[in-house]
Image (cartoon, rainbow, N blue to C red):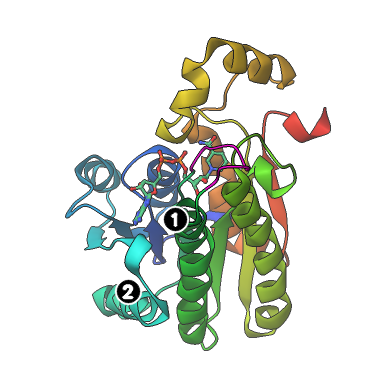
Amino acid sequence: MSILDSFKLNGKVALVTGCSRGLGQAMTIGLAEAGADIIGVSRGSSADETAQAVKAVGQSYDHISADLSSLDAQGCKNLVEQAIDVHGKLDIVVNNAGIIRRSPALEFSEQDWNDVLQVNLNTLFFIAQAAANHMRATGGKIINIASMLSYQGGITVPAYAASKHGVVGVTRALANEWAQYGVNVNAIAPGYMATDNTAPLRADSERNASIVSRIPAGDWGQPDALKGAIVFLASDASEYVHGTTLDVDGGWLAR
Ligand code: NAD
């Protein structure tokens, strides 16, 4: 097999949470372009734009509607089983769905704290657990979406920083246990990317200027910039990569 063939995902089935827009949508399309069939998860009853793009590159798209803000461990298990039922298997899981709440730490509410941890960390762990219980027999790839705030504290986003530090920690913990089953658990830490999630920062001209001036690449990242990283970590090309977090940040962390 040539090295380029090892990046191909033909015959693989990928589950992506939060596939309807932003980074999740771009990574879903990247996986489909590399040959994977997609099971997309989002709160809505469909993710039409994503589904159309996946079908346009010749792959199948099936949708599961789920609100991760109210999903407990059993709910995550049911979601993964529903996904496995579609093609009788599951090869790749991308835990992408995430939320952010902004408020000074002195006033940060318990509700906001719990909401952010629930979507960004609790469901990520229990979806990974359910997937690995299937993949331990077959091998597989689990990719968690981290952040620059997996390394830094950020400003007025304490729950988000806690959850994203947790994503890197749990990625390492799971890799340690599941590498022996041929299950690769890794993370991607995107830098400052132009999506709905960061629209308030880009709308604040002072914050926007200070962020852009600190990015060696000189601008916000576009969601498509994650396609290479996601395909690498979802493919045989990353067979011996376990527990790492791949920064796709325009050089932010190097500064
Ligand atoms: P976004 O707000 O544009 O999209 C988030 C996705 O998650 C959407 O598809 C949304 O429907 C889904 N989602 C949110 N809450 C959900 C819930 N309760 N149930 C089901 N789905 C839910 O955000 P984005 O910028 O594309 O972020 C995607 C991921 O990347 C998140 O984990 C985010 O923390 C992370 N991230 C983003 C950036 C950035 O600069 N945009 C940087 C680093 C990390």
Question: Does the segment drawn in magenta span residue 105?
Answer: yes
* SS label for mark 1: helix
Image height check: is 86 above or below 5? below
Image height check: is 136 above or below 40? below
Q: Nearer the viewer, residue 116 or 77?
A: 116
Which secondary structure dominates the residues rendered in magenta? loop
Residue underneath mark 1: 111
Distance from disc 2 to disc 1, alpha carbons, whole Å, reads: 24 Å
Please state which of the two labelled residues, at mark 2 or mark 1, is closer to the viewer.
1
| Magenta segment boundaries in residue numbering | 101-108
Image quadrant containing the C terminus: top right
Type of amino acid under label 1 = Gln
Q: Which residue is drawn at 65% across and 17% down?
A: 212
Judged left or right of residue 220, residue 199 is: left
Given the current orientation, which residue lies at the most extreme front position? 107
Answer with the quarter of the image where residue 180 lies.
Answer: bottom right
* SS label for mark 2: helix
Q: Residues within 10 Å of mark 1 (few under 14, many from 20)?
A: few
For marks 2 and 1 on the same chain, the one whose residue lies earlier in the sequence: 2
Q: Nearer the viewer, residue 110 or 72?
A: 110
Given the current orientation, which residue lies at the most extreme right position? 255
Type of amino acid under label 2 = Leu
Q: Residue 79 — which label? A: 2
Q: Which residue is drawn at 42% across and 79% down?
A: 73
Judged left or right of residue 15, residue 151 is: right
Instruction: Judge whether residue 239 can be spotted in this image.
Output: no
Find out whether the residues at labels 2 and 1 contact each other: C-beta distance under 8 Å.
no
